[in-house]
Image (spheres, rainbow, N blue to C red):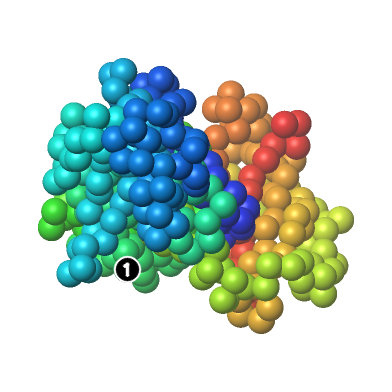
Amino acid sequence: MKYIIKESHYVYLLENLDKRKRLFIDLLGEDLINSIQKITSAKELPIGFLRNFGTSTIQTYIDRYGSLYYFVFNGEPFIYKDRISPKGEEYEMYINDKGESFFNGQITNRLGLSDVGLEFSDVIDAFHNEGEPLNESTDKNKKFLTNVMGHDFTGKIEQVTSTYDVPMEFDNNISPAAINYYLNKFGPMYLFELDGIKYLYQDQDHGDFFIDDYGFYYNDEILEQLGIDELGLRFSDIIDLYFNEEETLNEGIDMSQNVKVKKLLQNLIENKDFNISFEDEEYVYALGADYEELVYTPYEFKFHMIVRDVYGEGSKTVANIDVIIDDIQKDNEDFYDEWVNDGYHVGVWYIEELNIKIDQEIFEDLPFSIYLTFYGYDE
């Protein structure tokens, strides 16, 4: 089982914030974005607003309701404020320098924000509220993405760290061996439902991986369906935001190195040579015959292992171990170069089988999780 220990959630949110900024710049244009100013004093506004409303009136409004925001749209200056009505309803108010007021989405429609389910407050949050508390930023990011996607994933994403976590609907379409391989190589998978269809998702080296419970694989279709491809987002960004993996890990895993277990594993496996053999079974036509016979082809692997790091305590411990393959023999002939020609690919069946054998023969009795990464000795 592999757990990816990520950087802080705060760093992620800053990266996500940059993506939001790029979205708004593309949508509204740099001129409008660059014109936005936070107004904390009436004297900061152009003279047109002061003539229509009076300096003291505007300042009293700021003192009572908080900062205003000034921006220019198509050459026309506006001031903006998000408000709450006496009934507790949130609304946005815009006023131009001629004294005209705009409500009920008139300006957001003209800006094109309504088309993507956004409000001008989302723009303000992206460019002027970067220092807000983390939990507020998280909630606003969720609101932002929920508006874009039309789907709220809060509490609807389940982490998969074992084949036992996968619903039976997937059994006929992706084997437990394949799921184990993906978990060991790429880390946790995630289960979610969208429009009545269940999906397994994983962040893999080549990008986002999806398979539904009917056995269909997807690349960018899910991102397009959710509308997040245009934001430059991947589904892994959704996972980071809606499934607080860092919190889950902090609850179950000690993020510091477990020095004692690391030394124990080093004594157990390092500076030792290991051999594992197994046979491939296949039916081939017998020489000069019109029938097939079962042939067993032996494979032998020589390797050594290095303990990279160990996190956690007790049954929650996770150890990351590098397996360095020194030699591969197929039917007593060199086969290592074939693996090299395959680009040291860990997805070939014999490396998957080796992964299973190592787990069964060497680590099966350990009361915690092992994640193996395979390398060639000459990589």
If the image is split into quadrants, where does the N terminus sit?
Answer: bottom right
Callout 1 secondary element: loop
**Which three-letter amino acid code belongs to the residue tagged 1?**
Gly
| Residue 216 at least partly seen | no
Q: How many marks?
A: 1
Q: Nearer the viewer, residue 340 or 321?
A: 321
Q: Is residue 213 above or below residue 336?
A: below
Residue 334 position in % (x across, y down): 66, 31
Q: Residue at x 26, y 38 (%)?
A: 95
Q: Mark 1, residues whose alpha carbon is within 10 Å: few (<14), some, or many (≥20)?
A: few
Q: Is residue 13 above or below residue 196?
A: above
135 is higher (above) or lower (below) than 121: below
* Residue 376 appears in the figure: yes
Q: Residue at x 34, y 28 (%)?
A: 48
Query: Does 288 sit above or below residue 280?
Result: above
In the figure, residue 66 lies in which quadrant? Answer: bottom left
Residue 72 in the figure: left or right of residue 274 = left
Q: Is residue 146 left or right of residue 184?
A: left
Tell me what residue is drawn at x 67 percent, y 73 percent.
254
Quarter of the image with the C terminus in it: top right
Of residue 265 and residue 311, the one placed in the foreground of this image is 311
Q: Position of residue 232 (x, y in %)?
A: 39, 32
| Percent coordinates x, y for residue 104 in the rendering | 14, 46
Mark 1, residue position: 155
Which x, y percent locates residue 360? 57, 66
For residue 120, side relative to residue 318 (left or right): left
In the foreground, 115 or 83? 83
| Image quadrant in which you'd find residue 220 | top left
Q: Residue at x 74, y 40 (%)?
A: 326
